[in-house]
Amino acid sequence: MQNEIIERLIEQFRTLPGVGYKSAQRYAYSIIEGSKQRAENFSHAILEAKSKIGFCKTCGNFTDEEICPICKRRNHKIVCVVKEPKDVISMEKVKDYEGVYHVLFGTLSPLENRGPDDIRIRELLDRVGSEGVEEVIMATNPDVEGDATAMYISKLLKPLGVKVTRLAQGVSMGSDLEYADEVTLSRAMEERREIK
């Protein structure tokens, strides 16, 4: 029988994605066995991130400013479209990519009642129209929803005269970008193909 306070701490760790009971228990014990300073630093880092990190007004990436550093410094003629902000971090492993990003905050999913108005497609279309975008790279996950979203967006962009490409396969079907290694992502970016 565990102490109630320890159990509450374990349950909080279990709310994190991919953390089961055993891992949550190890994390809780690590906090309890560590110094008070370490626990304070950990809780301060969480609270600071929660209060200061938001989303870039332009692309939707995580930032502590109104406009993220990528949008401030990069080429706006190439836009790489991703599902979530954490995918930007994964795509940044491709060292020679000099364009910007657009975070959709989801993909089309009829089963989850998520349609075009529920993700940031309209904002993408506005950017393409106002920023002189020449190429949009669809870097949604290589799964059914990611592919459907890429196809839907490409059909909207084609009449605007924008080149729409998709990452080449190499990223396994059904996998998430965050788990792809640097070499695989670099090759997928280099060998991207136009969506027809």
Image: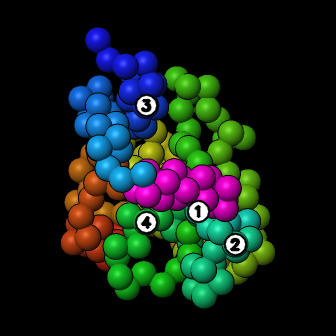
Q: Majority secondary structure of the magenta segment?
A: helix
Q: Please give the name of the residue rendered at 67% of the width and 51% of the height, measured from the top-left corner.
A: 120
Residue 13 on the magenta segment: no
The disc placed on residue 62 is 1
Q: Which quarter of the figure is the N terminus placed in?
A: top left
Q: Earlier in the sequence, mark 3 or mark 2?
A: 3
Q: Amino acid at mark 2?
A: Glu
Single out the mark in the foreground, 1 or 3: 3
Crowding at dot 1, Cα within 10 Å, few <14 / some 14-19 / many 20+, comes out as many
Q: How many marks?
A: 4
Q: CA distance from mark 2 to mark 1?
A: 9 Å
The disc placed on residue 192 is none
Q: Amino acid at mark 3?
A: Leu
Q: Earlier in the sequence, mark 1 or mark 4?
A: 1
Residue at image mark 4:
89
Tell whether label 2 touches label 3 (CB within 8 Å): no
Q: Nearer the viewer, residue 15 or 182?
A: 15
Q: Please give the name of the residue rendered at 44% of the width and 25% of the height, measured from the top-left corner.
A: 5
Tell whether label 3 touches label 1 (CB within 8 Å): no
Please tell me whether mark 4 sits on a helix, a strand or a loop. Answer: helix
Residue at image mark 2:
65
Q: Earlier in the sequence, mark 1 or mark 3?
A: 3
Single out the mark in the foreground, 3 or 2: 3
Q: Amino acid at mark 1?
A: Phe
Q: Nearer the viewer, residue 157 or 50?
A: 50
On the image, the x and y values in percent for residue 84 come to: 52, 52
